[in-house]
Image (tube, coloured by chain):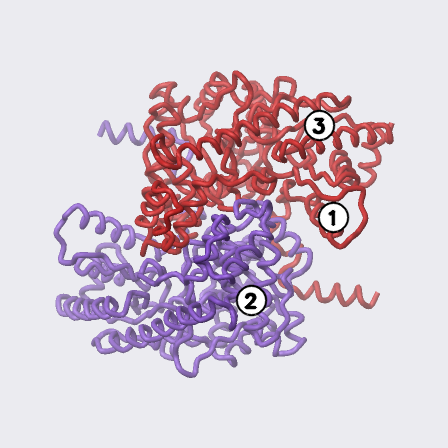
Chain colours: A red, B purple
Amino acid sequence: PQMAENEALSRRQKVLTIDTMNANIKKVEYAVRGPIVQRAVQIEKELKEGVKKPFNEVIKANIGDAHAMGQRPVTFFRQVLALCSYPELLDDDKFPEDTKYRAQRILKACGGSSIGAYTASQGIECVRQDVSRYIERRDGGVPCDPDNIYLTTGASDGIVTMLKLLTAGEGRTRTGVMIPIPQYPLYSAAIAELGAVQLNYYLDEDKCWGLDISELQRSLQAASKHCNPRVLCIINPGNPTGQVQSRERIEDVIRFAAKERLFLMADEVYQDNVYAEGCKFYSFKKVLYEMGPEYFNTVELASFHSTSKCYMGECGMRGGYMEVINMDSEVKAQLTKLVSVRLCPPVPGQALMALVTNSPQPGEPSHAQFLKERTATLGDLAQKAKLTEEILNTVPGIRCNPVQGAMYSFPQITLPERAIREAKEKGQAPDMFYCMKLLEETGICLVPGSGFGQKEGTYHFRMTILPPADKLKILLSKVKEFHQRFTKCYS
Amino acid sequence: PQMAENEALSRRQKVLTIDTMNANIKKVEYAVRGPIVQRAVQIEKELKEGVKKPFNEVIKANIGDAHAMGQRPVTFFRQVLALCSYPELLDDDKFPEDTKYRAQRILKACGGSSIGAYTASQGIECVRQDVSRYIERRDGGVPCDPDNIYLTTGASDGIVTMLKLLTAGEGRTRTGVMIPIPQYPLYSAAIAELGAVQLNYYLDEDKCWGLDISELQRSLQAASKHCNPRVLCIINPGNPTGQVQSRERIEDVIRFAAKERLFLMADEVYQDNVYAEGCKFYSFKKVLYEMGPEYFNTVELASFHSTSKCYMGECGMRGGYMEVINMDSEVKAQLTKLVSVRLCPPVPGQALMALVTNSPQPGEPSHAQFLKERTATLGDLAQKAKLTEEILNTVPGIRCNPVQGAMYSFPQITLPERAIREAKEKGQAPDMFYCMKLLEETGICLVPGSGFGQKEGTYHFRMTILPPADKLKILLSKVKEFHQRFTKCYS
C-alpha cells in the first residue's frame, strides 16, 4: 500500500498523465499494429530465448509489408538509389547506363547535387513532373498539372494532411467524414485525433463488398443532424476488403459527391494490384474527367498513391504523392504553407517515386529485367489471391469474397456462441479472442475484423496474401485446422 | 464583373474554401520558407530565363541546408547507405569492411533484410540501442534506456508529436507552451496548428541572447490567468540566435521547471555545433541527472536530435530521435500507439541515425577519413561563425552577437525611420521590407527577424553561416554595401 501510495503521489506530480493528455489521442486506435502485433513481437522474443511453443516461427500476415514477407526489391530502383546515395558509383561499370542517367537527373535537381539537401516542400519539381506524366499515361491522356502534385511521406501523410485542412467547426457544425466499413484504420485514427466526426457507410459483403449509393445516402442523412458532412473517403482497390470498383459505380459516387457537395478523397494506393478477371482499375480522376466539364470543373478531389504497395512494396522508404483537383487557390496556398513547416518529404522516397512513375522504357538497358521482375511479382500476387480465396472457402464456417485486388482477404468467420460469450466475459471482441488464440497456438498473426469495423454481429479477420506461396499454403492449412479445432472446442 | 461573379459563384460552391477550412491552419506561419523564399525561387527562374538582374545567382542563406551550400556528405555514411540500398554491392572490394559490417547489421535488423520493409513504429531496435549508447557516451555515463528512444522523421516530427500529446483543455485550461523569442518558427507553427497557447519569453540580446530566469517567471505569471502553462521549450544551442547555454543556466531552468511543474522540451539538434572558446554543450539530460534523484526522478523531459545539422547536414534523409525521461508509463503507451498510425520513420533516415550514433572507431578502416571529414566540416563552420560576426560588426547600424554555436547569426539592424514608415504603408514588417529589397538588389536570401519574433521596435535578420568561406565573404560584403546604401537612401 505504501508503494501504491508513492506511485499515486508521483503520478499526481507529473505534468503529463493519462488524465491531462490530449483526449483525442486517447481515442485513436490502430489495429494493424495493435495488441495482437505487440504480443506477436513478444512471442518472437520468447522463441529466440528458447521458450517452447507449438510452432517455430511467427508469421506476420497482419500488415501489407511485402519485403518483410520475402518479396525482392526491384533491381532498377535499388541501383538508382545506391547511385544517388553514393555518386562515386557513377563511374562503376556494373551499373546500366539508364540507372546512371536517372540518378544524375535526380541529383541535378537536388541542392548541391545531394539527396541530403532539403527539397521544395511540395517535392522536387522534376519528380512532380514525372508523376504528372505518369498520371496522364495511366488515365489515357487526361491532363495533369505538376502544380497539383504534392509529394508526401507515404500516402498516410497526405491523407492526414487533407483531413486536417478539412476539419473545422464545433458541435453540430463539426466536419463529418464518411468512410467505408470495413475501413483501413488510418482513417478512423486520423478522424479521432483531429476530433472530426466519423460517419460510417457499410460495404455490402454479400455483393463482394460492393458500394451502394443508397447506403451512402442513409449514412449521410443519419449524420446531417449532428455534424456537417463534408468529406467522402473511398478506398479502391479496397483495404481490407480487396474489391475493385466498377467504372459505373465510380460514376455514381462522383454524382453523389457532386450532388451532396462532398470533398472526395480517393485512396488509390493499390492501383496496380488488380487480379480478378473482368476487373480493371479506373482512377477517380479519369472517370471524373470523362463525365464532362460539369463535373470535372467542380468536384473537389484528392487522390493518394504510395511507393509502399503495388509491385514495389517499398514501405520503409515512405514515398507517396497526392493530386488535388479543383482545390480552391487560397486553400492550396494554405496547403503549401502547411507542408512547408515539415520542410520536405524524405528525399530517398521522392527519388523512388520518380523511378516508379518514370520506369525503364523499351530500348533502355534495364527495361527487360524491370519488366520481368514487375510481371513476376504481380503474377505471383494474383495467384496467391486466388489460392487464398479458394482454400479459405473450403473451411466450413469461413466465407471469403474474391480477392479482386489489393493485398488482403477479409473473410467472415462464424464463431460458436460459447466463444462469443467467453470473449465478452474477458472484455475482448470475439474476433480478437479468436485471433489471439490463433496466434498463441499457431504463431500466425492476423488482425481481427473489429479493428476495421464490421456489421454488428459479424466477425472477420484480415490476412495479407503476401507470404511466399509455399508458406502461404502452410499458413492457410494451419488456419483451416485451427478454425475447425476452435469451432469444435467451443461448440 | 461577370467573371468576378462567376468566380465568386464557383468559390461559393466549393466544399473547401478559405472560410470553411481548419481555422488553426490559417494561423500557421513558417518564415523560413515564407514569401521571401518563394520570391527567391521565382528570381532563380527569371535568371534561368535570361531576365537581367544586378546579380548572377541567388544565394540562399535562409535555411540550415548544408549540402545545398556545398558541404560534402560524409563518405562513410553514404557508402553504408549505398550498401543498404543495393546489397549486391556487399561483394564489391571498393567498400571498406566496416561499411559492410554496418550495412549488414542494419539489413539484418530489417524485415526480409530490406530497408524497404516497415520497421517497428518506435524505430529499429538495434538503432535505438546505438542511440542510447551514444547518449551514454555523450553524457559521461548517465544511463539511457533504449525503450525511451523514439526514432522520428527529423526532429520536427518528434517536437510536433510531443506538443500534440501535451495539448489539452479549453479556454483558460488550454495548454500554454513557453517558447523563446526569437524562436525557431516550427514551434509557433505547431502551437497554432494545435490551438495551444503560445507563451513568449524573451532572450536578452544585450547578454548574448542569454536566458534569464526572472523573464521565465514574468512570462509564466502573465500567462497563468488565461491558460494552463505546462510546457517549457528550450533551444540549445540557439536557433536563430546561436548562443550556447552554460551549465549553471541549464540548472536554473531545470529548477524552474521542477518548481513550476513544467514539461521540459530540449531542442538539442545543434549539439555538435559549438564554436566559441569557453562554450561547451551540456545536455539537459546530463545536467538533470547530476542534480540528483530529487530532480532526475521527477522532472519530465523530452530531448530532440536530428541527422540534419551538426557535421552531417543530411536534411533530406529526415532522420531524428527523441528521448523521453520520466514519462508516465500510460502516456508512453499512448505515444507508442500514436506513432504506430504513421507506421514507421523513413528507414534510410533510421539507418543514418545508427551511423551517426555509432560512427567508425579507432582501428576501423573508415576511422581516419571519417575523423578528417568531420573535423574539417566543424572547423570550417567555426571559422565561418567568427568571420560572420566580425564582418557584420564592421557595419555601422548592424550589431551581431558572437555566433557561439548552431549555424546562424541573428544581427540587429538599425533601420531609418523613413524605411520603417514606407514598410508600414505597404503593410510589411520593416525587416521584411529590408530583406525583400536585399533580395531584389543582390540576390541574397535572408529571413527577416519578424519571422522568429523579436523585441518590439527592434529589427533583425537570420543568416546561415553555411556558404563556402569565399562565397560567404562576398555575401557579407554585399550585405554591408547594401546596408549602407539602404541607410543612405532612407535617411
Place of residue B330 in the rendered image (x, y in percent of width and height, measured from the top left): 68, 55
Crowd class of label 1 (few under 14; some 14 to 19; many from 20; radius 10 Å)? some
Amino acid type of disc 3?
Glu
Callout 1 and callout 2 share a chain: no
Mark 3–mark 2 distance (CA, rounded to whole Å): 45 Å
Crowd class of label 3 (few under 14; some 14 to 19; many from 20; radius 10 Å)? few
Q: Is residue B456 visible?
A: yes
Question: Dot 3 falls on which chain?
Answer: A
Place of residue B401 in the rendered image (x, y in percent of width and height, measured from the top left): 33, 76
Q: Secondary structure at mark 1?
A: helix
Left or right: B159 in relation to A143: right
Q: Is residue B176 visible?
A: no
Q: Quadrant of residue B478?
A: bottom left
Mark 1–mark 2 distance (CA, rounded to whole Å): 36 Å
For disc 2, the marked residue is B264
Q: Are marks 3 and 2 in contact (CB under 8 Å)?
A: no
Q: Secondary structure at mark 3?
A: loop
Question: Dot 2 falls on which chain?
Answer: B
Q: Are marks 1 and 3 in contact (CB under 8 Å)?
A: no
Q: Quadrant of residue B23?
A: top left
Place of residue A247 in the rendered image (x, y in percent of width and height, measured from the top left): 47, 18
Question: Dot 1 falls on which chain?
Answer: A
Residue at position x 75%, y 52% from top? A46
Amino acid type of disc 2?
Leu
Mark 1–mark 3 distance (CA, rounded to whole Å): 31 Å
In the rendered image, which quarter contains the C terminus of chain A? top right
Tag shown at residue A456? 3
